[in-house]
Image (spheres, helix red, strand yellow):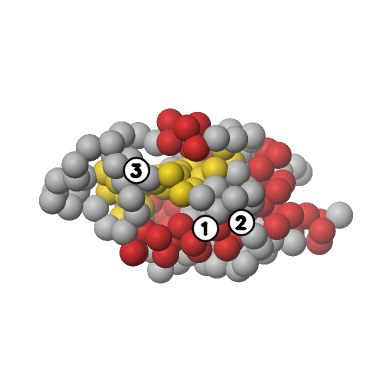
């Protein structure tokens, strides 16, 4: 795949720091769209066939040229897609609109290391709600920042479980394979 970036401004950017900014990049995992709300990453969507599909996956319409900080994350995502280990744990994520339970689950998921997995039940326990494994599944399905919050590492007890990317579980398998998980499970 090419290493192109889509990000020509649609309109003049204001100086409003809270304006939503969106960019799309090509990667080994398909097109990835990233949205920032101020300095926080608000949304990531990956596995798209076209830049238009990636951009359409984002809430908001501020398509921009990435700044230096944003370019750094975009390169890290490309590197991850090519097989480089990255925890992404230094990034500020936008949890606006999330309940305290959802935040606990997302933060607990963020602790699952590259190449490791956890079950929905174990993630529920790690988030302090051991009986809430189905609710944890709903939180994972609504994860707005996959890979940064590695919901692909959360598995059902006897299967891979679901994945809310455009190509669904096939992308989850690809991500787990990239991290060497599937080779160890076979």
**As rendered, which of 157 and 140 lies closer to the eye?**
140
Pointer 2 with pointer 1, Cβ within 8 A: yes
Q: Name the image quarter holding residue 48.
A: top right
Q: Distance of mark 2 from mark 1, alpha carbons? A: 6 Å
**As rendered, which of 30 and 181 lies closer to the eye?**
30
Element carrying mark 3: loop
**Residue at position x 86%, y 54% from top?**
186
| Circle 1 residue | 77
Which marked residue is nearer to the observer: mark 3 or mark 1? Answer: 3
For disc 3, the neighbor class at 10 Å (few under 14, some 14 to 19, many from 20) is few
Q: Earlier in the sequence, mark 3 or mark 1?
A: 3
The x and y percentages for residue 70 are 36, 59
Which marked residue is nearer to the observer: mark 3 or mark 2? Answer: 3
**As rendered, which of 115 and 166 lies closer to the eye?**
166
Q: Name the image quarter holding residue 89.
A: bottom left
Tell me if 97 is positioned left or right of 26 in this view: left
Whether residue 96 can be seen here: no
């Amino acid at each position: 795949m090419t290493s192109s970036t889509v990000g020509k401004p649609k309109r003049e950017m204001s100086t409003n720091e809270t304006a939503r900014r969106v960019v799309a990049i090509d990667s080994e995992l398909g097109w990835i769209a990233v949205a920032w709300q101020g300095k926080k990453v608000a949304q990531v969507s990956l596995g798209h066939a076209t830049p238009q599909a990636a951009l359409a996956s984002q809430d908001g319409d501020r398509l921009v040229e990435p700044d230096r900080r944003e370019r750094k994350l975009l390169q890290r995502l490309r590197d991850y897609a090519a097989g480089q280990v990255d925890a992404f744990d230094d990034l500020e994520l936008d949890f606006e609109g999330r309940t305290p339970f959802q935040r606990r689950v997302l933060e607990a998921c963020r602790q699952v290391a590259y190449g490791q997995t956890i079950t929905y039940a174990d993630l529920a326990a790690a988030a302090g709600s051991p009986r809430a494994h189905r609710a944890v599944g709903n939180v994972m399905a609504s994860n707005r920042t996959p890979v940064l919050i590695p919901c692909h590492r959360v598995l059902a007890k006897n299967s891979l479980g679901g994945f809310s990317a455009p190509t669904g579980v096939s992308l989850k398998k690809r991500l787990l394979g990239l991290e060497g998980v599937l080779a160890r499970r076979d």
